[in-house]
Image: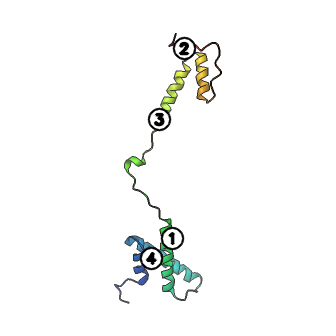
């Protein structure tokens, strides 16, 4: 074989992959696994054939694991800030604390998720509506 002619597994890796870098990675992975197999047990009769099978299996494994992703834009990497909501909640709690006792108790129960008490004959005093 001529020195400038790529080996058959390298050619096959290029056919199986989209980019040259992916093909080189695939060929290296197959070569590494082949060498590991030969080092453990010398039961591979035709290493070239075994290398081709490894290439195909690794390529299929990569195809199965590939998930299409969309390119991230700058606005996609941001999350909504939590500070404005927390500030609003703190201001609301402070405003509730400034209410008369009956109204503050009612609002505190509503904040905790408890239902409003059954209407009574006496209404809580409302400073705005008189």
- Near mark 1 (Cα within 10 A), the count class, few <14, some 14-19 or many ≥20, is few
Q: Earlier in the sequence, mark 4 or mark 2?
A: 4
Residue 12: % across, % down: 42, 79
Judge depth for marks 3 and 1 and give the one in front: 1
In whole angstroms, how far apart are the C-alphas of marks 4 and 3? 51 Å
Name which quarter of the figure residue 111 lies in.
top right
Q: Earlier in the sequence, mark 4 or mark 3?
A: 4
| Mark 4 residue element | helix
The coloring applied to the image is rainbow
Q: Earlier in the sequence, mark 3 or mark 2?
A: 3
Circles 3 and 2 in contact, beta carbons < 8 Å: no
Residue at the disc numbered 1: 61
Q: Nearer the viewer, residue 129 or 50?
A: 129
Judge depth for marks 4 and 1 and give the one in front: 1
Judge depth for marks 1 and 2 and give the one in front: 2
In whole angstroms, how far apart are the C-alphas of marks 3 and 1? 45 Å
Q: Earlier in the sequence, mark 1 or mark 2?
A: 1
Residue at the disc numbered 2: 126
In whole angstroms, how far apart are the C-alphas of marks 1 and 2? 70 Å
Name which quarter of the figure residue 9 lies in.
bottom left
């Amino acid at each position: 074989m001529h020195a400038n002619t790529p080996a058959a597994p390298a050619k096959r890796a290029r056919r199986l992959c989209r980019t040259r870098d992916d093909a080189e990675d695939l060929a290296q992975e197959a070569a590494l696994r082949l060498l590991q197999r030969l080092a453990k047990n010398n039961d591979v009769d035709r290493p070239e054939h075994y290398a081709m099978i490894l290439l195909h299996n690794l390529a299929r494994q990569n195809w199965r694991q590939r998930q299409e992703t969309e390119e991230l834009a700058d606005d996609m990497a941001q999350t909504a800030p939590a500070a404005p909501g927390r500030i609003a909640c703190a201001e609301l709690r402070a405003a509730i604390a400034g209410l008369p006792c009956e109204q503050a108790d009612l609002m505190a129960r509503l904040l905790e998720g408890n239902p409003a008490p059954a209407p009574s004959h006496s209404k809580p005093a409302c400073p705005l509506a008189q």
